Image: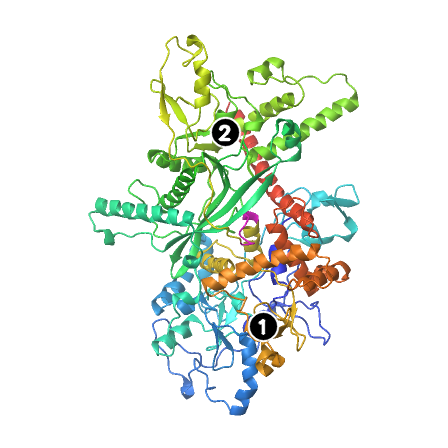
Amino acid sequence: MDIDLVRVETTDEQPLAPKRLKLHHVSPNASKNGHGIPYVSVHEPKPVLQEQKNNMLPKQQANLRVDTQHPINPIGHGIDGKVSVVKNNMIPHVKQENVLADKDKNENVLDLKNKTNGRMDVTVSKSGKPKIKGVSLTELFTPEQIKEHTDSLKLWVGQSKAKVEMNQAMEHLDSACQLCEVTTLNFEPPPIYCSSCGVRIKRNALYYTAPTAETCHNFCLLCFNARSHTIQVEGNQFPKAKLVRKKNDDETEEGWVMCDKCERWQHQICALFNAKRNESGEAEYTCPKCYVWEIEHGLRMPLPQSAVLGAKDLPRTVLSDHIERRLFKRLREERQERATRDGKSFDEVSGADGLVVRVVSSVDKKLEVKPRFFEIFQEDKYPAEFPYKSKAILLFQKIEGVEVCLFGMYVQEYGAECADPNQRRVYLSYLDSVKFFRPEVKTVSGEALRTYVYHEILIGYLEYCKQRGFTSCYIWACPPLKGEDYILYCHPEIQKTPRSDLLREWYLSMLRKATKERIVVETTNLYDHFFITTKECKAKVTAARLPYFDGDYWPGTAEDIINQYFVEEDDRKLQKKGKVKKTITKRALRAAGQTDLCGNASKDAILMQKLGETIYPMKEDFIMVHLQHSCSHCSTLMVAGKRWVCRQCKSFYICDSCYDAEQRLEEKERHPSNSRDSHVLHPVDIVGVPEDTKDIDDIIECEFFDTRQAFLSLCQGNRYQHETLRRAKHSSMMMLYHLHNPTAPAFVISCNICKLDIETGQGWRCEECPEFDVCAACYQKDGGGNHRHKLTNHPSSADAQSKEARQMRVQQARVMLDLLVHAQACRTPGCQYKNCRRIKGLFGHAGKCPKRASGGCKACIKMWSLLHFHARACKESKCNVPRCRDLKDIIKRSQQQAETRRRAAVNEMMRERAAEAAKRR
C-alpha cells in the first residue's frame, strides 16, 4: 500500500475561515466539538484518506451557502464589458467601505499584519481581507485571455461526446458555476488496492480496511474470507474482527469558491484558484467577470507574469537546455517544411509555441539486488547494489494562458563508476503524456506534431547521454493497464491506451530517426543480445550479464523463478524421492559457455532457460539501443582504444582484446568462421567518448517528484487530474506550486514572549542568541520584548515568489535533514547545535504520546513528517534514525507491489495472446 505522502504535509493546514468555500454535505452523525457545533469541512483540493467517509447532507440542503446569498440585483456584466443598470447606483465590485474611522483602523492594523504574516506578496484590500497576489492565476490574464479561458471551459476538451452533451444539458441552472455553467462535478476516485494480494478493488465493491500510523491497509473480500482469523501483511497481524467494512463508492465533489465582489460561486478549478495560497481562508478573491469589469473601468491592471512563478522559472540544467535547443531548432525546420509545402510564408502556418522543458528531479539512488538472485551470483563478485541517478523530465506548453504539463518521463542513469553489468547504461523507466498538445496538425511526413515533439525530446536525451559517455539505453515498451496511470493522473477519455505492438512501433520510429542522425548505432532486443549465441559470439550466456534496472521486468521475474525453484527443490527433499532429477544437461551447460557444471552454475543455466522461455514471446518489447558499437565476440560496448572493422561483413566489429586473441588463432579459425577466406580487419580509433560520465548538473531534490510513485500519490491525494483540459490546467498550476515550494517539514517553534506556535518563516529571530524567536504579533507590539540584539525577519515559507526564495526553501530542507541526523545521535545535554533540543523533544514526545499522529497529535504529525522526509532522502543502508529502515521498507514494498501488478498484467496479456493464437490454429 502506498504511503500517504500528502497526509503528513496537510493534516494541520485545515482552513481557518470557511466563509468563501462551499460546504461539504454534512451527515446527521457528524462529530461535534465541545460546544455541540458539528465540524464542517470545506471543498478544498486536499488529500482525502481512503479510510475517510464522505459526509452527505440531505438532498434538500444540497445548495447550502455559508454567510452568502445571491445578490438581489446581480450585475449583468460579461466578458464583452457590457454592464446592465444597477439599482441605487451601487457597484458591488467596489464595496462602500472606503472610509473607516481612525479608531477602527488602529484596532485592525495589528490583525491585518498578522493575517499577512509579513509576506511581501500580500496587501490588504478595502474590505479588510489579505489581498494575496496570484491567489487565482486569472489575475495574470488580459481580458482577451479571460474570454479564451472561459470559452474553453464549456467545450469540455478531453471528454467523450456523450459526457460533453450531458454537461451541456446541465448548463444555465440557478446553482451552476458562473464560469462553466454546470453544477456538481465529481472527481474520478483514486484506485484502491488489496494490501495482501495486490488486486485492484473494483468500483462499488466491498472491502475491509485497517488504518495505521504509517499507512492504510485495505483487503479485498477474497483475502478477508480466507480461513485464518487474521491477515498478515508486511510482518503485521491484523485481526479480522477489528477491520472496518467499507464500500468503494466514495465520490468527491469539486471545490467551490465565492467572489468577494459579486458573491457568486465558481468551481475552484474553473477559477484557477490556488487554495494552497489561501492560508487563512480569508484571502480576497475576484472572479474573472468582475476582474474584467475592473480592468475595463481602470480599477486594476493584470499582475505581471513574474507574480506567480511558472515553468520557465524552474531551475535550468545542462540537460534541459540541450533538449530545448534541439527541440526549438527542429520545430523551426519542421514549420518551414510545412510552409514550403503549402506555399505559405513561415508566419502563416501554425507552430508549437510556449514550450518549456525542465528537469524537475535529479537525485542519487541505490538499487539493491534482490536477495535470491544475489545469493546465486555473490560468489562471482556480483554487486550487492547499483548506484544510479534518477531524473524526472517534464514538458509544459502554455495553453490559453496556463502552462500545462503534457509529457513526462523518468530515467535511470548508471554511470562509469557503477559496476558491470550496469556500467554506462541508461534505462527509460516510465514515459507518459496527455493529448492536449497545440496545434493539432500533422508534419510533412504525416505524423502528428505532438509525436514529432515527443520524439525530439527522446532523441535529444539520447544525444545528451551519448555525449556524456553512456553506451546503451534500454526501453521496455509496456503500455499501462486499463485504468492505471504511470506519471500523470487520470487521462482524457479521448486518448486511447496503445497496444504493446503500437507502442513498440512508436519507439522504433523514434529510434530510426536517431539512427539516421548517427546518434544510435544499432537497435536490437534483450533476448537476441544476451540469450542467443552465434558462431562469432563468444560471450558467456549468464544472467550475471543482464543489465539490472530498478522496476524492470526481468529482475522481478527472475526472483519469482528462483523462489519457485527453491520451493520445488525443498518439496522434493521433503518427499524423499531420491536424487533430484536434473532439469538441464551438461551438454547444454557447455553450449551456454558454462565451465562450472555444478552448484550455482546449474541454477544460473536453469534461470536463463526459464527466463528466456518467458521473455521470448514478447522479446521485441524489450528494446536495447546501442549508442556505441558492440564487440561481435565478447558483446562489450566499446568506449576506448580501437575498433577493428571488417569492411566485407556487415556490422562486424571487435575490441582490442578480442583482436589480440584473434591474432593468436590459426588462420582457418579466424574471422569469418563460416568461410575459408580470411578477411582483413581495419583499425578505427574510438574518439569522443569521455572517460567518465560525471553529471555537471546540480542535484535537484523535491520530495514529491523524486519517484514516479510519489508524484502519482501527490496527484491522487490532491485530485490533480488530467482527464479534461480544464482540470489539466489547474493540476499543472498546482504541480508548479509544489515545485516552487518544496515541502520542508518543520517542527513547531514557539514564541519566547507569548509562547504560541510560529509557522516557519513567519517570525523574527535573533542571530546571536540561540533559539530566541518571536511571532509577528509580538514583534509589532513591542519590538520583540525590547530584546537587546537585532531581530531578523524570516521570509515566508508559505510561498516562494522568487527564485531566491525557492533556493532558500531547498536549503532549509537540507538543514532540517542534517539536524535530524545530528539530534538522534547527540548525547550532549547542553548541545549548542541550533534547535537540537527541540528535535530531541519531538523524539521523546513521539515515544510516549498516547494520542499519536493517527489520533491527530500535532507534535507527532510533525515528527512523522520529518521521518518521512528523511527516509525518502536517506542513502544509508544502516541508518540509525528511528523508523528510517521501516519507512524505507514500506516505500520499497509499495514500489514492488506496483511492479508485481505490472508484470502480472503483462503475463496475463501474453497468456491471452497464446490462447487466441491456439484458437486460430
Left or right relative to 232: residue 600: left
Residue type for callout 1: Gly
Q: Which mark is residue 749?
A: none
Q: Which mark is residue 526?
A: 2
Residue type for callout 2: Leu
Q: Secondary structure at mark 2?
A: helix
Numbered circles on residues, count: 2
- Residue range in magenta is 702-709
Q: Which callout, 1 or 2, points to the residue nearer the camera?
A: 1
On screen, residue 620 above or below 853 = above
On screen, residue 403 above or below 197 = below
Colouring mode (rainbow / by chain / secondary structure / one colour)? rainbow
User: Residue 921: where, in percent of width, then height?
Assistant: 51, 22
Q: Which residue is mark 1?
A: 763
User: Residue 248: where, in percent of width, then height?
Assistant: 64, 53
**Separation (CA) of disc 1 from disc 2:** 58 Å
Of helix, strand and loop, which mostly describes the magenta segment? loop
* Mark found first going from the N terminus, 1 or 2: 2
Q: Is residue 156 visible?
A: no
